[in-house]
Amino acid sequence: MRRSDRVRQAFLTTAARIPWPVWMPAAALASVAMAVLPARPLRQWQANVAALTGDRPGRLHTARAVWSWARNTVESMHLGSWSRERIDDYAIFSTEDEHRLRSLAADPGAVIGLPHMGSWDLAGAWACGAGMPVSTVAEQLLAPEFALFRRVRENLGFIVHGHREASVTSALVDESRQGRLVCLMADRDFSRRGVPVVWPGATGGVTATMPTGPATIALRAGAVLLGVACHYQGRRMRLVVSQPITPPEGADHETAVAAMTQGLCDFFADQVRRHPHDWHMLQPIFPGVRA
């Protein structure tokens, strides 16, 4: 195990045990300190944001980004101890967005594509408690870390598949047809086998690839594809739900998947430009954009 992996595993294990009133001031101080001399992952985040917004974040925005990332990590570890009332109070929607999500999840079913923004685990916890049990895929990094995240999420009502599992797409199609809400992180193409997309930026389009899973599963399951993005709003977290993302009329499967994935990309880019400090993308995502 690499030293960085051991540090991350120790951080996650510790975060799950420290009460929020103790953790919060420590995270705030660490955020400011890390923004002064940002490490490479933070410099990569700055480069990613600059590619979309045209402005490289300064120390204040970088500190806010570190704080948002830490908040997401700690909240994810603590969600298992939160009451239903606390989760419902914490996750907020516009009336229109919540109605759209609930009605489409009920009929014909919904597949959700999310960017790495805010706390997607909190969003999933809210959905499970609201009668929309979540199925998802998690990246299998270190076995103890994956087991920790899987245990926390399954206790909230998730079904969690590892990304290396055989026939995971077929399993998610079946679970969507059974009435589960399939939720997939979709802004970064881990497989390098995604479709080309253009992220709308402040000074033009930024090319990349995105995974085809959300669009493929929605089409195969006969479900609607929606984008959902989360950002912190004071002590709470707001969830923004896109309009249904539909394929061009008469498109074949390949063309439909490409068009729907571009639709997700357009929604993600708009949300990232509005709330860049809540986008936890500390890895390279755009070709040629490196720290």
Image: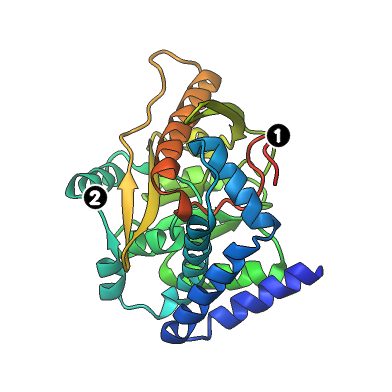
Q: How many marks?
A: 2
The quadrant in which residue 288 appears is: top right
Q: Which residue is mark 2?
A: 98
* Residue 288, label in figure: 1
User: At label 1, which amino acid type do we have?
Assistant: Gly
At x 48% / y 59%, what residue is drawn? Answer: 60
At x 38% / y 44%, what residue is drawn? Answer: 274
Label 2 secondary element? helix
Q: Is residue 204 left or right of residue 139?
A: left
Label 1 secondary element? loop
Q: 20 or 185, which is in the foreground?
A: 20
* Residue 103, label in figure: none
User: At label 2, which amino acid type do we have?
Assistant: Glu
Q: 212 or 63, which is in the foreground?
A: 63
Give the class, few, some or many, for how many residues have Cα within 10 Å of label 2's Cα (few <14, many ≥20): some
Colour scheme of the picture: rainbow
Residue furthest to the left: 95
Q: 126 or 41, which is in the foreground?
A: 41
- The answer to whether 70 is drawn above or below residue 179 in the figure is below
The quadrant in which residue 138 appears is: bottom right
In the rendered image, residue 230, in percent from the top left (x then y), is placed at 39, 53
Does residue 4 appear anywhere in the picture?
Answer: yes
Q: Is residue 46 left or right of residue 222?
A: right
At x 52% / y 68%, what residue is drawn? Answer: 70
